[in-house]
Structure formats: C-alpha cells, structure tokens
C-alpha cells in the first residue's frame, strides 16, 4: 500500500532519503498568466531560471503517447488488468529485456518513431522556445525519453545541463523543455529545481562534487539532494506534475529527480532548443541512446 496519507513522507533520490519538509521543499510558481506577454515570460525565465506551464499541452495526446510507448513492452512488464496508457509496473522485468534505452529496448526505438517525432513537432513547443530565446530556435535531434520504475533506486542526480553540452555560445542560447508523459507527483519521480540556483557561480557548488556515488564522472553535482539543499541554503522547488504540463529551464539551473516509489511509472521527454545559427554540440545532432555517453 502507498503512504499517500502521510503528511511528510520521506522521499528519496538515487536511494538517498530527503525529508519532505518546508525547509527543503517549496512550490514551483506557474507562469501561465504571462503566456500572452512574451517580455513578461522572458523576465520570469531570467528571474526564476524556469517557466512552469501547467496544462499547456493536450492531456489526451500526452496520454496517447504514454500508451504508445508502454504498449511496446513484452507481456509481464505491465501490471495485469491495466492499460498501457496507465503505465503501471507489474514489479518484474521480463527476461531478455535489454538495458533501458540501448538498442533493442523500447525507449531506443521510441525516440526514433514517427509518434514521438509528431508529438515533438508541435508548433507550440518551437513557438515557445522562440519567444523565450528571442529569435529563431531549433530543437536538437538528441531527444531523451526518461523512464523509471519503482525499485531501482535510480533517478537523475543534481546537475546543470551546461555540464552535458559543450558551450555553444557565451552566454549559451539554449533551453531545455521537460515534458512529463503522464501524471508525475513527487513520489512518482518528479523533477525538482534548486531555487534560484541559476545565479550561482559554479565554484559555489563545486565542493559538492567530491561526495559522489559516481567517481570518475565530474558532471553530476550530487546524488544527495538534502546535502545539496543544505550546503547551498536553498529549497527544492516541486509540484505534482500532470500530463499536459510543461517545464522550460535555463541550462544553468540545478535540477534533479526523485525516485519512483509508486507502481505508476515515471515517463518524460526532455528536449533542447538552440538559437538558430548557433553552433550545436555535435553529440546532440544524433538521436539519443542511453549508452551514447553524452
Ligand atoms: O527527467 C529527468 O530526470 C532529468 C531531466 C533533465 O535533466 C532535463 O530535462 O534537463
């Protein structure tokens, strides 16, 4: 049974607990009211490092995409009596399913599929990127599908996107859009943003990289979200995301995700937009594969 009635449940990220307390978590602020005012939207992006747009996408279409993806899995992966669109994990991974996101795994095929391409070709996404970047914008071909199920103790470590891309311009004219493909409250593994962290100098969070569960990879800032929040004196901003919501963030903001603790699986897409004419990091010109090293 899931502990929805607990007022302050302990959450986890990469298996490390973080208390759901007001000194560690605060609310993401929606920007929907500014949609008709490009200058105000850009101000919000600059001030907060993110723009949160609940319900801007067609919920039914997002759920269709979720169903199309989960229908690619072999029998036994989804819980009996549930629909692919529900994305409910049975608790066991069928023998022979390749590692997540590598050739042969459904996520690898799905990011190359017409359904995924059609979904991301939505002019609303490019239009929003152009508004926020203040000119022409191109979606980079490396488009990531992130899928987590309960029990792995795996999530995205605290990081900034700039550390995963060669700088393209100074200041870099790149934005990320994060799209939950299904409802995604914290316990399902939502994305969280460290408040105002896009204004920090990298030297301020550099010491956190020394306490790592991934020696040899200097890109993640930390797998310990409570340590990160306390060290930098900032809260993790969160919301209970729903299918149809959209996040846009700047490449300097620290963000991470929580562990999936529900049987409902976490599915999301993240894509990057670059100002037209800027030179892209060549690694982002190829379709994503979980083992592409980028
Ligand atoms: O979905 C995640 O867990 C991480 C996503 C992310 O880092 C991004 O969208 O930039």
Image: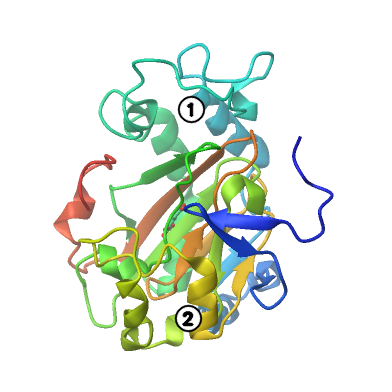
Disc number lying in front (2 or 1)? 2
- All told, the count of numbered labels is 2
Q: Which disc is residue 69 wearing?
A: 1
Q: Is residue 209 above or below residue 231?
A: above
Describe the element under mark 1 as helix, strand or loop.
Answer: helix
Q: Position of residue 197 (x, y in %)?
A: 47, 81
Q: Which disc is residue 197 wearing?
A: 2
Q: Is residue 39 visible?
A: no
Q: Can residue 223 be seen in this view?
A: yes
Using residue 53 as the reference point, say whether residue 5 is left or right of it: right
Pick the residue in front: 155 or 113: 155
Q: Is residue 196 above or below residue 263?
A: below
Pick the residue in front: 207 or 200: 207
Q: Position of residue 38 (x, y in %)?
A: 55, 75
Describe the element under mark 2 as helix, strand or loop.
Answer: helix
Determine the image quadrant of residue 280. bottom left
Disc 1 residue: CB within 8 Å of ligand 1: no
- Residue occupying image coordinates x 53% and y 37%: 151
Using residue 273 as the reference point, say whether residue 240 is left or right of it: right
Q: Which disc is residue 170 wearing?
A: none
Q: Earlier in the sequence, mark 2 or mark 1?
A: 1
Q: Mark 2: few, some, or many residues within 10 Å (few <14, many ≥20)? A: many
Using residue 260 as the reference point, say whether residue 249 is left or right of it: left
Looking at the figure, which quarter contains the N terminus? top right
- Residue occupying image coordinates x 17% and y 66%: 279
- Compute the Cα span from label 2 to label 1: 33 Å
Q: Position of residue 160 (x, y in %)?
A: 37, 69
Pick the residue in front: 277 or 20: 20
Q: Quadrant of ligand 1?
A: bottom left
Q: Mark 1: few, some, or many residues within 10 Å (few <14, many ≥20)? A: many
Disc 2 residue: CB within 8 Å of ligand 1: no
């Amino acid at each position: 049974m899931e502990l929805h009635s607990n007022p302050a449940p302990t959450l986890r990220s990469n298996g490390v607990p973080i208390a759901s307390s007001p000194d560690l978590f605060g609310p993401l602020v929606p920007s929907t009211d500014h949609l008709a005012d490009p200058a105000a939207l850009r101000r919000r992006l600059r001030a907060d490092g993110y723009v949160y747009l609940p319900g801007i996408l067609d919920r039914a279409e997002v759920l269709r995409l979720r169903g199309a993806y989960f229908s690619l899995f072999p029998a036994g992966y989804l819980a009996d009596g549930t629909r692919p669109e529900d994305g409910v994990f049975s608790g066991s991974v069928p023998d022979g399913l390749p590692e997540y996101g590598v050739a042969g795994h459904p996520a690898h095929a799905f990011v190359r599929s017409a359904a995924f391409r059609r979904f991301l070709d939505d002019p609303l996404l490019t239009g929003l990127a152009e508004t926020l970047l203040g000119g022409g914008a191109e979606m980079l071909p490396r488009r990531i599908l992130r899928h987590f199920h309960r029990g792995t103790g795996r999530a995205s470590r605290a990081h900034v996107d700039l550390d995963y891309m060669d700088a393209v311009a100074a200041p870099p004219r790149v934005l990320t859009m994060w799209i939950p493909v299904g409802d995604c409250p914290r316990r399902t593994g939502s994305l969280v943003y460290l408040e105002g962290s896009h204004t920090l100098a990298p030297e301020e969070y550099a010491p956190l990289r020394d306490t790592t569960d991934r020696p040899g990879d200097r890109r993640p800032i930390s797998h310990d979200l409570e340590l990160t929040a306390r060290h930098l004196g900032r809260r993790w901003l969160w919301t209970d995301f729903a299918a149809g919501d959209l996040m846009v963030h700047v490449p300097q903001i620290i963000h991470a995700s929580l562990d999936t603790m529900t049987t409902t699986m976490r599915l999301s897409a993240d894509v990057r937009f670059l100002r037209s004419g800027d030179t892209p990091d060549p690694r982002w010109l190829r379709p994503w594969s979980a083992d592409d090293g980028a």
